[in-house]
Amino acid sequence: MKINWGTGIVIAFGLFMTFILYFVFEVQSNSKYDNDLVVEEYYKHDSHFQEEMARIQNAHDLQHKPSIKYVEEGVKITFPETFESNKLKGNVLLYRPSNKKFDFNTQIVLTNSSLLIPQKKLVKGRWDVNMEWQYEGKKYLTKEVIYVN
């Protein structure tokens, strides 16, 4: 039996489609590949966007801003000395873009005007740090990206 070039193209196209469909089904059915949305309730989150921008602007307008840094002991969040720790409340969300299983929230409890998130809670790689806090009734939002070694 002789195969001409037209039949060869159809066979190649069929094999290519089979190859692609195999990988699509593999990724969708295997729990090893986590393909969830970045935010669970996307539209609900999006409706509060303007409020979030106002809180980011409040944090940007501060003369003395809190700092978020990675040190050997973990992630260190330092507030200016002028902030009274009993008037400050909020939480810190550490978000892992590659795997939501590592995400966690921590309440802001200051010791000597700083908060340390220990190294043992962190996996190496990129972390998005979202710090939502309130001081004297005014709301703030600070976002940083850090890399853990």
Image (tube, helix red, strand yellow):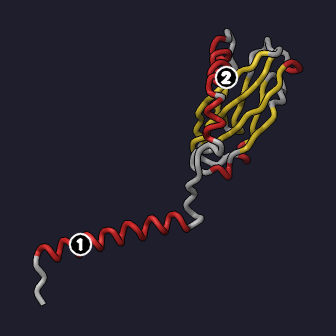
Residue 57 x, y percent position in the rendering: 63, 16
Left or right of 119 on screen, residue 85: right
Residue 10 vertical placement versus 54 (above, below): below
Of residues 75 and 29, the one nearer the viewer is 29
Q: Quadrant of the N terminus?
A: bottom left
Of residues 45 and 109, the one nearer the viewer is 45
Task: Determine which of the numbered discs, if any, sits on residue 12 in the image.
Answer: 1
Task: Determine which of the numbered discs, if any, sits on residue 51 in the image.
Answer: 2
Residue furthest toward the right?
A: 86
How many numbered tags mark residues here? 2
- Of labels 2 and 1, earlier in sequence is 1
Of residues 43 and 59, the one nearer the viewer is 43
Residue 33 x, y percent position in the rendering: 55, 61
Q: Are marks 2 and 1 in contact (CB under 8 Å)?
A: no
**In percent of the image, x 40 and y 68: which residue is there?**
21
Q: Amino acid at mark 2?
A: Glu
| Secondary-structure class at tag 1 | helix
Residue 115 vertical placement versus 121 (above, below): above
**In percent of the image, x 86 and y 18: which residue is there?**
87
Residue furthest toward the top?
A: 63
Task: Determine which of the numbered discs, if any, sits on residue 70 in the image.
Answer: none
Residue furthest toward the bottom?
A: 1
**In percent of the image, x 65 and y 18: which residue is there?**
54
C-alpha gap between disc 2 and disc 1: 54 Å
Q: Quadrant of the C terminus?
A: top right
Left or right of 74 on screen, residue 88: right
Q: Amino acid at mark 1?
A: Ala
What is the quadrant of residue 13 in the picture?
Answer: bottom left
**In percent of the image, x 65 and y 25: which residue is there?**
52
